[in-house]
Image (cartoon, coloured by chain):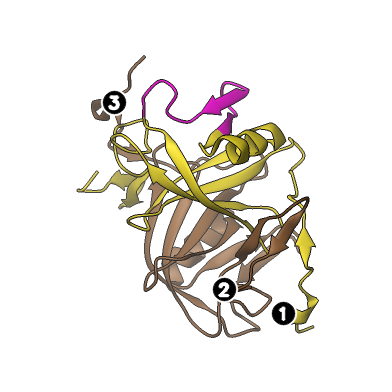
Chain colours: A brown, B yellow
Amino acid sequence: MTKTASQTPETLAPRWNDQGLIPAIAQDVETGDVLMLAWMNAEALALTLDSGEAVYWSRSRNALWRKGETSGNTQRLVDVRLDCDGDTLLLSVEQRGVGACHTGRRTCFFYQPGSSDWELTEEG
Amino acid sequence: MTKTASQTPETLAPRWNDQGLIPAIAQDVETGDVLMLAWMNAEALALTLDSGEAVYWSRSRNALWRKGETSGNTQRLVDVRLDCDGDTLLLSVEQRGVGACHTGRRTCFFYQPGSSDWELTEEG
């Protein structure tokens, strides 16, 4: 079956997974680099939209995670989009501080396929 | 506790979730646009790396999904990175055909926050 643009609904709601979460991709508005992927619950998304600063849900700490609260590496929300089937968010952010990654790097994506495992990239 | 770059392991393996999947973000190598988020199991990742064409795991069909197999909107793999904690992949791809989205759009991210639900963007 071929799907066409006309089948696209005018409005959509986020589809939370069975843990009540949705993946949120953060993209640097200046460089276009994909910085990280984190998760949001409904409260984190509402806080993000209200405050204009990225708030995620930490799955390891099981708590709201105001990005950069301790590190200062906050993310100012510039734009946010929901995807065609409502199960992923894309945040365009102004990344403050040294970067998005807890290791001090600008982006979290710095391992490339190696001979067996994945290896640190040179720029990492 | 402050984490530093020196604590970053030299090698890393993908961390599959309890369904044996990992989220994979596809980014357009030409425009920098984030095109979509899909999921991979180990076989999909191996096929992607071997073939140089994006292969995902369809959670709705419970089957391997060779992106663009029927639509022609294939994705040539240019680069792939694993993130700092091994639970997300970032694919840099050359998007062929009309786009990544099943609606015929270039990218899947075209709903923006509205007064209640999320609304189609004008460019959508």
Mark seen at residue A100: 2
- Asked whether the viewer can see residue B3, the reply is no
**What residue sits 56% from the left and 81% below the top?**
A73
How much space separates mark 1 and mark 3, taking CA atoms? 47 Å
Query: Same subunit under labels 1 and 3?
Result: no
Query: Which residue is the site of mark 3?
Result: A7
Q: Quadrant of the C terminus of chain B?
A: top left
Asked whether B81 falls inside the magenta stretch, the response is no
Q: Please, which residue is most extreme toward the front here?
A: A115
Bounds of the magenta span?
B56-72
The crowd level at tag 1 (other Cα within 10 Å; few <14, some 14-19, many 20+) is: few
Front disc: 2 or 3 = 2
* Residue B11 at x, y percent in the picture: 78, 62
What's the distance in space between the residues labelled 1 and 2, CA to CA?
13 Å
Q: Is residue A49 left or right of residue B123?
A: right
Q: Secondary structure at mark 1?
A: helix
